[in-house]
Image (cartoon, rainbow, N blue to C red):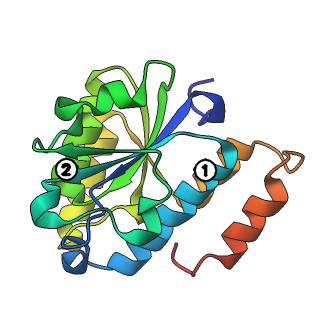
Amino acid sequence: MDDIIDAQRSCMVLVDYQARLMPAIAGAQAVIDSAALIAHAARELGIRAVATEQNPARLGATVAPLQSLAGATIAKTHFDACEDGLADAVGGDARHIVIAGCESHVCLLQTALGLLRRGHRLWVVGAACGSRRHSEHQLAMQRLAQAGAVIVSPEMVLFEWLRSFEHAQFKSLHALIKAAPLGS
């Protein structure tokens, strides 16, 4: 059943939501809100979340709404975070990767392709990804879909992780979804 995201086999990857980068991202607040929704759900469900930071001395740390939600943060110099240890941080047991980040057409794209090359099944949360230009974001989503990643919405991820309204965290995560800003 590899077409449904399995919470037991999942890891969340948050790519480069950095303080000095985010102001340049088109629709940055909506991108951050969508990423926070997924990251909060991952934390509540016990799903490991790993953040990356491209040249943090220059671009700053992960933005506050996401910083506390990542269990680990990897500083990197390569655009593909796998080259700087992400593949090891994700671990071999996490075959289902839910990924989001910035910029869609650079670090998010190259990191996602790196994870695909390493045999992971990948779901890209399109609304939680961004670039300076919408056209670059759209092209990145097209390329990732062509490469074998599945482009999903935040709610798709949450409800696939839950599988049923009988899940112990359904009520709290449903409340989180309802409280999320429109567009997340």
Residue 96: image x %, image y %? 50, 31
Q: Is residue 120 left or right of residue 33?
A: left
Q: Quadrant of residue 111?
A: top left
Q: 162 or 23, which is in the foreground? A: 23
From the image, tell me which residue sits under label 2. 107
In the picture, the quarter occupied by the N terminus is top right
Q: Secondary structure at mark 2?
A: helix
21 above or below 125? below
Label 1, residues with CA under 10 Å away: few <14, some 14-19, many ≥20: some
Label 2, residues with CA under 10 Å away: few <14, some 14-19, many ≥20: many
Q: How many marks?
A: 2
Image point 61% across, 50% down: which residue?
Answer: 43
4 above or below 24? above
Q: 151 or 5, which is in the foreground? A: 5
The disc, 1 or 2, on the residue closer to the chain's N-terminal end is: 1
Image point 21% across, 46% down: which residue?
Answer: 75
Residue 65: image x %, image y %? 46, 70
Q: Is residue 66 left or right of residue 141?
A: right
Q: Disc 1 vs disc 2: which is toward the camera?
A: 1
Q: Amino acid at mark 2?
A: Cys
Q: Is residue 37 left or right of residue 73?
A: right
Q: Secondary structure at mark 1?
A: helix
Disc ID at residue 100: none
Q: Amino acid at mark 1?
A: Arg
Q: Is residue 112 left or right of residue 149?
A: left
Image point 40% across, 25% down: which residue?
Answer: 120
